[in-house]
Image: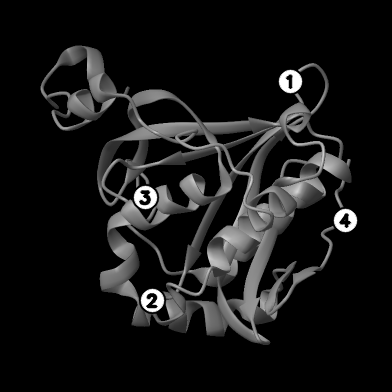
Amino acid sequence: MPIAIPTLHEDSVSLRPVRIRDAKVLERELMENRSWLRKWEATSPYAPMSFDTRASIRNLLAHSRSGNGLPFVIEYDGELAGQLNVSSITWGSLSSATIGYWVSERFAGKSITPTAVAIATDYCFYQLGLHRMEICIRPENAPSLRVVEKLGFRYEGLRRRYIHINGDWRDHFCFGLTAEELPHGVLRRWRDGHVPADAARVNEADLEAASHPLPVNNPLNRSF
C-alpha cells in the first residue's frame, strides 16, 4: 500500500518528500561533498558506483509507492542540506523500519541530523504506528554515533560485514528504539534533557571486535 510522504518541521529543520526535480541539486551536493561522504556511502558489490541521482530518486519513490519507504530531503532554513530515508518498512508482527541519512559538511554541527532523525522517528511511531526503529552505523563514523547518543537510541550489537560501504562489506553497530520506551516522543525527550545516560554506549567487547575486521579471504565471509 502506498505511503503518503509528509512534510515535517521543527524550528529551522524540515523534512519534505524528495522529488525528481531535486536530482540536479542533490547531485551537486553529493559531488561537492565527496571527501566528506564517500567513506560512508552505500555501494554495490555487483556494479560500479553510479551518480544517476534521478534514477536513485525514482527507486526511492517506487519503494514509497509499495509501502516500504519514506524518502525525505532535509532542509535547513529552506536550503537543501541532505537526505533522510526511512527504509525496509515492515508491517504486521514486526512493524519496524530503518533510518539512514546524510548532510552536507557545511551543515555539520547545527543539530540538523538529530532533529531530523527525531521528527522522522516520532512520525513513524505515532502517525504510522510502527513499533521499532533501527539505525546501523559504521564504528568509524563518529558524527553518526553522536546522533544516536544524543537521542538515546539503545545499543543492540555488532553486525559483522553487514552493509557494502565504499567498496567493501563493513561492520556496523546497531541501535534501536521501540515506541513503548517513548510515551512523549524522541524529540521531546531529547529537548527536555531526559535521554538516558549511556543508552548508546558500545560495550568493550564489541569495540575490540570492530577494531579487527573479519579477513576477506575467509570463505565463510564471501557473498555468492
Mark 4 vs 3, N-terminal side: 4
Residue of label 3: 43
Labelled disc at residue 55? none
**Marks 1 and 3, how far apart at CA:** 27 Å
Residue 82 falls in image quadrant: bottom right
Q: Position of residue 12 (x, y in %)?
A: 68, 80
Residue 209 left/right relative to 180: left
Q: Amino acid at mark 2?
A: Glu
Q: Residue shown at 14%/17% (left/top)? A: 218
Question: Which is nearer the eye, 94 or 48?
Answer: 94
In the structure shown, which secondary structural element does the residue marked by tag 3 occupy? loop
Residue of label 2: 105
Q: Are marks 4 and 3 in contact (CB under 8 Å)?
A: no
Q: Position of residue 80 (x, y in %)?
A: 59, 81
Which one is closest to the eye, mark 1 or mark 3? Answer: 1
In the structure shown, which secondary structural element does the residue marked by tag 2 occupy? helix
Mark 2 neighbour density, 10 Å: few (under 14) some (14–19) many (20 or more): some
Residue of label 1: 94
Q: Amino acid at mark 4?
A: Ala
Q: Is residue 213 above or below residue 117?
A: above
Residue of label 4: 4
Mark 2 vs 4, N-terminal side: 4
Q: Position of residue 91 (x, y in %)?
A: 80, 27
Which one is closest to the eye, mark 4 or mark 3? Answer: 4
Q: Amino acid at mark 3?
A: Thr
